[in-house]
């Protein structure tokens, strides 16, 4: 009985994430890395626990175990125009100064270098350790000026938007504002609604649905 209780607590404590990052999205960044010539300098700024292999320099403010350089995106410890590709995944919503972070990235990019970023649009609040901003599909290229847009689109689809919002609404209502109860109800609801997100395998390819996408990606080039 004790073992069963422990297993139940573990399940409730760790429900599936309420969003789906499809293989199409996962392969996009890896394909950009693979397309870089031998000797290219590739920076993953705010890398966290991601690891794209030995070719990529992983930079973050803490050591995740795969971190190459410990530093802030607000002050990159690199010379001007030294990078061929910069990756910035799920970072801009969490930094105090997004403009300064982008300026630093653009500073270290060579002319002709590529820049990849992702940013939430219709996505609930999530701390890491703070959560400060959102961006639409047309808005992300504007934020990344003066880079020239190469491609933009849905990073995480609308089914994930629905799944995450339903989870948060039900948890907020059913917990009755109880601080202890809220995360537990959130976890339980998470197990019930998570299958909805798999509709994104189909929906993320549909036109116009960027209007309700969970997050957006952008690829730009420095001229």
Image (cartoon, rainbow, N blue to C red):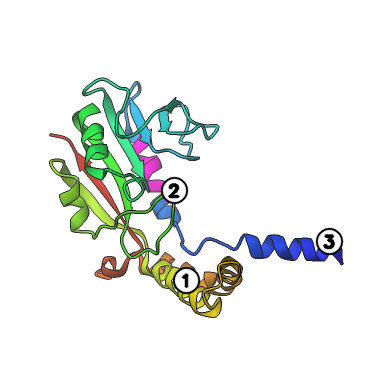
Question: Which sits in the foreground, 17 or 187?
Answer: 187
**Which residue sits at x=37%, y=48%?**
90
Relative horizontal placement of residue 188, taking residue 68 as reference (left or right):
right
In the rendered image, residue 33, in percent from the top left (x then y), is placed at: 36, 35
Work out which quarter of the rendered image holds the C terminus and state it: top left
Q: Which residue is mark 1?
A: 168
1 vs 2, front mark = 2
Earlier in the chain: of badge 2 and badge 3, it is 3
In the rendered image, residue 117, in percent from the top left (x then y), is placed at: 30, 46
Magenta segment, which residues?
A: 26-34
**Which residue sits at x=48%, y=33%?**
62
Relative horizontal placement of residue 161, taking residue 96 as reference (left or right):
right
Residue 37 figure quarter: top left
Q: Which residue is mark 3?
A: 3
**Does the residue at mark 3 contact the one at mark 1 (Cβ under 8 Å)?**
no
Earlier in the chain: of badge 3 and badge 1, it is 3
State the mark number for residue 36.
none
Q: Which residue is mark 2?
A: 129
Q: Is residue 86 above or below residue 125?
A: above
Kind of element beneath mark 1:
helix
**Which residue sits at x=51%, y=31%?**
63
Q: Is residue 79 above or below residue 218?
A: above
Say whether residue 39 is magenta: no
Kind of element beneath mark 3:
helix
Q: Please indicate, yes or no, whether residue 109 appears anywhere in the rendered image.
A: no
Work out which quarter of the rendered image holds the N terminus and state it: bottom right
Q: Residue lying farthest right? A: 1
* Distance between the alpha carbons at the discs numbered 3 and 1: 30 Å
Relative horizontal placement of residue 13, taking residue 149 as reference (left or right):
right
Kind of element beneath mark 2:
loop
Q: Is residue 168 above or below residue 136?
A: below
């Amino acid at each position: 009985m004790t073992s069963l209780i422990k297993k139940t607590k573990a399940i409730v404590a760790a429900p599936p994430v309420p969003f789906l990052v499809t293989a199409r999205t996962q392969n996009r960044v890896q394909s950009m890395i693979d397309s870089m010539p031998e000797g290219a300098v590739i920076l993953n700024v705010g890398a966290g626990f991601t690891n794209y292999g030995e070719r990529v320099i992983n930079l973050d403010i803490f050591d995740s175990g795969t971190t190459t350089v410990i530093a802030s995106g607000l002050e990159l410890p690199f010379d001007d125009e030294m990078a061929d590709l910069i990756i910035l995944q799920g970072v801009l919503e969490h930094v105090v100064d997004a403009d300064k972070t982008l300026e630093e990235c653009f500073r270290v990019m060579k002319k002709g270098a590529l820049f990849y970023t992702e940013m939430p649009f219709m996505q609930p609040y999530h701390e890491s350790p703070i959560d400060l901003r959102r961006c639409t599909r047309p808005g992300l290229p504007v934020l990344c000026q003066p880079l020239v847009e190469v491609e933009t689109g849905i990073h995480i689809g609308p089914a994930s938007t629905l799944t995450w919002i339903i989870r948060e609404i039900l948890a907020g209502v059913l917990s009755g504002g109880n601080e202890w109860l809220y995360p537990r109800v959130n976890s339980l609801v998470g197990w019930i609604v998570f299958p909805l997100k798999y509709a994104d395998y189909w929906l993320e390819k549909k036109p116009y649905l960027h209007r309700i996408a969970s997050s957006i990606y952008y690829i730009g080039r420095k001229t």
